[in-house]
Image (cartoon, rainbow, N blue to C red):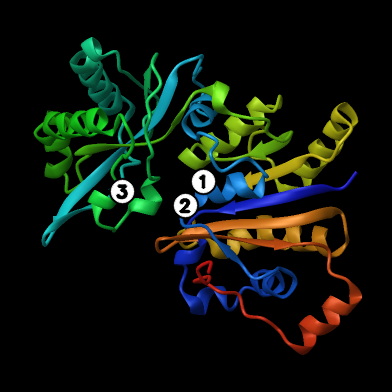
Amino acid sequence: MANSLILVVPGLLAQPLQRTAGVPSLRALARYADPPRSEPRGIAAALLAALGIAPATPVAPLALLGAGGDPGDDYVLCADPVHLAADRDTVLLVQTIDDLSQADAATLVRMLDRHFSDDGVQFEAPRPAAWFARRREPANLVTTPPDAARGRNLIASLPRGADSGTWKRWQNEIEMLLYEHPVNAARERRGMPPANALWFWGGGRMADVADVPVSIVTAPQTRLGDLARGIARRGGRDSPSNADVARLLALADGANVDVGAPVCCVAVSAPLADDLESFEAASLAPAIELLTTRRIAALHVVADGNGTAATWTATPPTLWRRLVARASPRAFEVAPPADP
């Protein structure tokens, strides 16, 4: 049975136009795909949409599962360490902090656990860059992913909902606790941005996660990789380590025998920096070949960068579409248009 393939490429849309314009596989994607669909809620929401998962599905319990934790029946929130900075008359979320050491992360988590023990909030970090807050009682919150809040007026992105006052108060307390903590003082001495706040988002219980498709996932140890692995584990599959596209499809073909239906294959890349050519050779070019030879039913490329996220969706091109594409080639759009 034909499977679909989802390539998740954080940072692709931040690449300069002169670089992406010269990548043959990106030009082929633009020829065969529908116009890109932008996703204002960020790349995690775009991944959920590509998998056909309901947009209200909470990210945090899935990400905790994918990071090696056990959400149980708790209400879980992603609690990403971030760096906030003042800009004129507002405060901006500048970046998430991904380079804490295991020891520094453990020190900060222990401090927060002690401070909030009477409030019934527990913190855990299965990885130094993957933090979560959990409580027995659910919260009525509407939150914003950090990539959707980055670089924008922070007030509009803070939690909303009936319980938002409590969580915003806790955020303020956390900022005060982190402001002069020795871990952050040492980071500043080394010229590194301090982790001076936590960003809560994606909350819910595993019971709030509806059906997810059976998926085979390969992903790095990143926040987005945690989410993809959690989706696969929730669907009853584990994730292979460092599988290439061909092995991923072979594993999915074998899984079809068990489940009796096509399986979604998800390949999450590490954030792109200067390795666009390596990504093309290892993932995108083989994926385009699988599409044009009809060995996959659909190819979805989910990407973000420069404050936007988008998805390109292509099905195997007919002869007519190939002829039209040759006559009227479409350029790969680094900045996809916003939805009307």
Secondary structure, mark 2, is loop
Relative to 290, 124 lies left or right: left
Which amino acid does the dot numbered 3 rest on? Answer: Ser
Residue sitting farthest toward the front: 162
Which one is in front, 241 or 58? 58
Asked whether residue 150 is in view, the answer is yes
Residue that mark 2 sits on: 42
**Looking at the image, which is closer to me, 327 or 136?**
136
Residue assigned mark 1: 44
Q: Which mark is residue 195?
A: none
The Cα–Cα distance between marks 2 and 1, rounded to whole angstroms, is 6 Å
Circle 2: residue type: Gly
| Residue with the most extreme bottom position | 327
Give whichever of discs 1 and 3 has the lower sequence position: 1
Rendered position, 312 above or below 217: below
Disc 2 from disc 3: Cα separation = 13 Å
Position of residue 215 measured from the top left corner of the image (x, y, whole percent): 71, 36
What kind of element bears circle 1?
helix
Q: Are marks 2 and 1 in contact (CB under 8 Å)?
A: yes
**Horizontal side, residue 51 vs residue 254: left or right:** left
Q: With 323 as the anchor, is 155 left or right in this view?
A: left
Amino acid type for the residue under numbered disc 1:
Ala
- Which residue is painted at 8% across and 33% down in the image? 180
User: Which quadrant of the rendered structure holds the N terminus?
Assistant: top right
